Image (spheres, grey):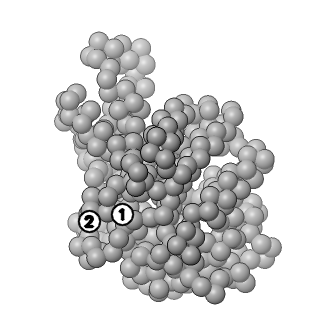
Amino acid sequence: MRQTVILFFFFVFACRLSAGAVVPVWKDIVYKEIDGRSLKLDIYLPPTGILPETRCPVVIYIHGGSWITGSKEAFVIPYMDEVLCSVLDEGYAVVSIEYLLADTLGKTPSFPEAVIDCKDAVRWVRAHASEYGLDSARIGLWGSSAGAHLSLLCAYTPDTLFMGDTLLADFSADVDYVIDDYGPADLNKLFRTRLGPVLLGCVKLFAPSLYKEREMMLSVFLGTERNRKQIKTVCEYYSPTTYVDRESVPTLLLHGDKDKVVPLKQSRKLAKMLEKHKIAHRLVIYPDAGHSFRTFTRQDIDNICDNILDFLHLYSHKNH
């Protein structure tokens, strides 16, 4: 369903867009309808005046929020709106998508539907690229936190895995690269699924909030009815590290060394596996940065924008 284009000055108070630039935005486009729910996406095109004559390469953004919260209107953290503006200013289009979220009570898990939705979004962009001036041959993924986990899963899994909307089945969900902002890579490690009942009991007794958060996160993947063996199997199935092989796409990993939500060792392990399989990648570690990079300095923001743009310039044009 095509919407009326909206022109407006975008983040002029904080953004690195060219002075006076106007960004064409297609808002709330329904890319999928299933079980009575509509999933939407927004398309941000490069500023008028620098719009390329050829079709725009596409960066699809998947928001974070512990697989439970968040929205496609996610560019509110200072570093993120700066990255968005920098990417647009370089002539890329950015597509921000919705996907199925789990309920906070854990009764309705969001997997595998969440990853299926994200792959369907890639397929939809490829199917409708010509309508919006997008290049269907140059598509990559960028995600933060839970969205980075989904981005990695989409990028690393075979095109035939996690198939969804039959109307989009003829289009590929393959991408050229993936950008991972502090995303979980090994869920068994993240959720400490190898802890025995005694140690888990100690965590529940002495760190009840941590235990409750762990249980809520596990419910995203399994619901409330589960056993220990099932937890390990499902966490492995939904871990990006499970799917790294010689065919994996180039990967940029961005992580803070003070991240207490998704520890840096998650990205270190993924980088080690990418190295083992000789996959082009780069791990950038930001000293004293926690989850979501909310403490970023001006220098940090400039650095992450430069790192992402350098990566895009290397890998979004590989077919051209």
- Which of 126/158 is in front? 158
Q: Is residue 257 left or right of residue 30?
A: right
- Residue at 39%, 47% in the rendered image: 244
Classed neighbour count for the residue bearing mark 1: other residues with Cα under 10 Å, few (<14), some (14–19), many (≥20) = many
Residue located beneath label 2 in the image: 164
- Residue at 67%, 39% in the rendered image: 286
Asked if the residue under mark 1 is in contact with the one under mark 2, i.e. CB atoms within 8 Å, the reply is yes
Q: Which sits earlier in the primary sequence, circle 2 or circle 1? A: 1
Residue located beneath label 1 in the image: 119
- Which of 78/132 is in front? 132
Residue most extreme to the right: 19
Classed neighbour count for the residue bearing mark 2: other residues with Cα under 10 Å, few (<14), some (14–19), many (≥20) = many
Residue 68: image x %, image y %?
39, 48
Vertical position of residue 104 compared to residue 178: above or below: above
Checking the image for residue 72, the label placed there is none
Vertical position of residue 14 compared to residue 44: above or below: above
- Which of 158/58 is in front? 158
Q: Is residue 36 left or right of residue 178?
A: left
Vertical position of residue 220 compared to residue 29: above or below: above
Q: Is residue 13 left or right of residue 278?
A: right
Residue 247: image x %, image y %?
40, 55
**Amino acid, disc 2:** Gly
